[in-house]
Image (spheres, helix red, strand yellow):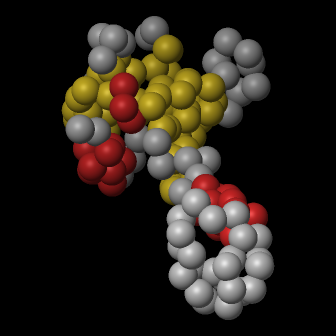
Amino acid sequence: MYCNMCGVENPNDSNYCKECGANLQGKDSNKQSVLDVNSNSDRELFAKAANLFRGIEAVGGKIYFYDNRLIFKSHSFNIQTGETTIYYSDIVLVEKVRTGIVPNGMLVTLRNGAKHRFVLWNRSEAINFLNSKIV
Ligand SMILES: [Zn+2]
């Protein structure tokens, strides 16, 4: 590793710079925490108004897309409608489906067999995004 203070190269396991005595581990852990923030999975990428079917009832709300998951939050603060979190790593299939006669549905199938049916406009952006996230 290179010393942040003087630029001299030191062995990777050094605690202090051999040249100027700066604390290399301290500098290194600071760098690490900056990286952690930059790759933070809590970064919201975009959000879309959507409905989520709970049984036969469509609940109005918004889908928030993060780096590693989406969260559907209903407009209602009713505890039963609440939030639904879906990790992209749990998704096996994202399909376009019709809702009645309107082609605006998105069906998300998880590894455990659970299916979540959303209704949203401009669904292609969301579907393309999810397909880029699932393996
Ligand atoms: Zn140094």
**Left or right of residue 92, residue 121 in this image:** right
Identify the residue at horizontal 75%, vertical 64% (top origin): 26
Expressed as whole percent of the image width and height from the top left, the position of residue 75 reads 68, 33
Q: State the residue lying farthest toward the bottom.
A: 6
Q: Tell me which corner region of the image, top left, top right, bottom left or bottom right, holds residue 53.
A: top left
Q: Quadrant of the N terminus?
A: bottom right
Identify the residue at horizontal 67%, vertical 12% (top origin): 80
Q: Tell me which corner region of the image, top left, top right, bottom left or bottom right, holds residue 93.
A: top left
Q: Quadrant of the C terminus?
A: top left
Of the pair 27 and 90, the residue shown nearer to us: 27
Q: Does residue 130 show up?
A: yes
Expressed as whole percent of the image width and height from the top left, the position of residue 94 reads 26, 33
Identify the residue at horizontal 48%, vertical 49% (top origin): 67
Expressed as whole percent of the image width and height from the top left, the position of residue 128 reads 27, 50
Of the pair 13 and 101, the residue shown nearer to us: 13
Expressed as whole percent of the image width and height from the top left, the position of residue 16 reads 72, 70
Task: Examine the rendered structure and indicate whether residue 46 appears above or below residue 89.
Answer: below
Q: Tell me which corner region of the image, top left, top right, bottom left or bottom right, holds residue 102.
A: top left
**Left or right of residue 43, residue 23 in this image:** right
Of the pair 108 and 14, the residue shown nearer to us: 14
Identify the residue at horizontal 61%, vertical 56% (top origin): 36
Q: Does residue 99 show up?
A: no
Q: State the residue lying farthest toward the front.
A: 18
